[in-house]
Amino acid sequence: MKLQKYISKVLDILIAIVLLLFFASFVFRDGRISGWYQQFFPNLNGSTITSMTFLDSLTGYGVTSINPDTLCYILKTTNGGDNWIIKYSYKPPYSNISFNKIQFVDNNTGYASAEYTSLFKTSNGGDNWSTIYTGLYPQDMAVINKDTILLVYSSILSGGVYRSINGGLSWQALGPVGGNGQPGSIYMFNKDMGFCLGNQMRKTTNGGVNWFLIPGENYWGIQLIDSLKGWKTVGAGIKVTTNGGLNWISQQLPNLPNAYSGTNLFAINKDTVWMIGNEYYFGLFYKTTNGGLNWGYQFADTSIHITLDHFINFVNAKIGLASSSYFVSEIHTKTGGNDTTFFTSVNNNSSIISHDYILFQNYPNPFNPKSNIKYEIKKEVGSQKSEVRIIVYDISGKQVAILVNENKNPGKYEVVFDGNNLSSGIYFYSLYVDGVRIDTKKMLMIK
């Protein structure tokens, strides 16, 4: 009994010391920055990139803001963003008009929108662009197919969501039009489901004909990877949904000094998501490889110490681009960035105490090299299955094992953790249900 108390006391002291070192390490700037480099555009005379889209790993398009010469541009790359050429120059009648969105529906047909009465269309892969009069002044655009386009703008008298089903030749007002808080951004996951944002966030499930409120929510950037799961950036960080945007749950980002939340994100798949962060002097990226259960970070320094605040776009898992609205340049990677430092706050108070789920202490503990972990789902019979994950972390917060990753019915379960390939030391295991961390417990392996 005395020996057991002694081991427990020593374990607590070791945890306290290591966690002090762990949190102190946040002030250390990761110097592994070789995975990103600065990529310049042609001479745009002060214009900055406002939107970008890629058709494949090589072919992409971008549009710009207006410059002091009252010109804005449509650009194209055919080598994954290494080089860009100007395909179209637009001289708006006023100095406050810029391109704000570009989207393609196939290799030939694409649209670009600007905050003026014309929509721009190409039918030959961006080589030539024609103008279509709309009479609208859109802040954002969503292209569904070559015929169906949605535009939004926030005029008090006639602002709202407008849709064309004939390639921009005529437009129909959808949903509430006029009044304060009209939408200035729109995101469509498919032809039926999407979101728009004015002073409140709304969702449609019938192509924009009707919109209903998502109370208390907004977004800076938003992307879904299927009809249920997706992420959005908000002023306080990032949130995830697992029910098509009806509810959003905050996910925890690393606590970095001199850093603040980013404005945009890009989800490669259900596990890997990138988000632009911002640090006063360096480019900062947040990244998850397990659907946001824990987030890491990496810095992307350049010769001009570019800060990122605008957009991020990944062509595939390796090729990615991000941009600042203050510099006529981009950050580019061909290697999926550099080494990401992953942390998880395994000893904080953010766990949710729930009577519906129980995570038990492992046994035996200490152990060598296997230990059993029990957990219980106490939801009522007949309720929906829960998305359950049990993840093991080392003392630095690095993920070392995923023991459970599946939907579970109510019941009692047991799983074995095998640390045969790991070294002796302190480990933590966390129970997540539907993306929310329920509980975390510590264990000790002695070989």
Image (cartoon, helix red, strand yellow):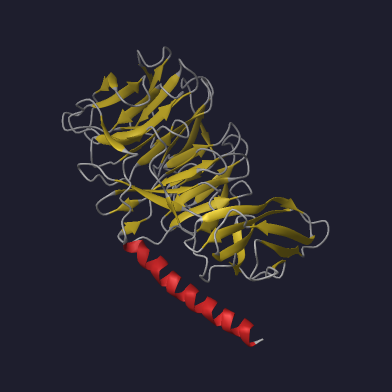
Task: Point out residue 403 in the picture as x, y percentages from the top left corner.
Answer: 66, 54
What residue lies at 40% left-to-right and 46% top-to-bottom?
A: 339
What residue lies at 38% left-to-right and 37% top-to-bottom?
A: 139
User: Compared with residue 134, is residue 283 higher up or lower down, i.e. above or below?
Assistant: below
- Whether residue 145 is visible to the viewer of this picture, yes or no, is yes
User: Compared with residue 291, is residue 377 higher up or lower down, i.e. above or below?
Assistant: below
Q: Quadrant of residue 304?
A: top left
What residue lies at 57% left-to-right and 84% top-to-bottom?
A: 6
Task: Point out residue 353 in the picture as x, y percentages from the top left corner.
Answer: 63, 71
Name, please, the residue furthest toward the front.
Answer: 447
Task: Point out residue 165 in the picture as x, y percentages from the top left corner.
Answer: 54, 23
Name, please, the residue furthest toward the right.
Answer: 381
Task: Point out residue 232 in the picture as x, y percentages from the top left corner.
Answer: 49, 48
**Count of numbered badges drawn on the protein:** 0
Q: Assign the N terminus to one quadrant of the image.
A: bottom right
- Whether residue 134 is visible to the viewer of this picture, yes or no, is no
Q: Quadrant of residue 226?
A: top right
In this rendering, position of residue 385 left or right of residue 221? right
Looking at the image, which is closer to me, 374 or 140?
374
Name, please, the residue furthest toward the bottom.
Answer: 2
In this rendering, position of residue 134 left or right of residue 374? left
Q: Assign the C terminus to one quadrant of the image.
A: bottom right
Looking at the image, which is closer to me, 272 or 180?
272
Looking at the image, which is closer to me, 281 or 104?
281
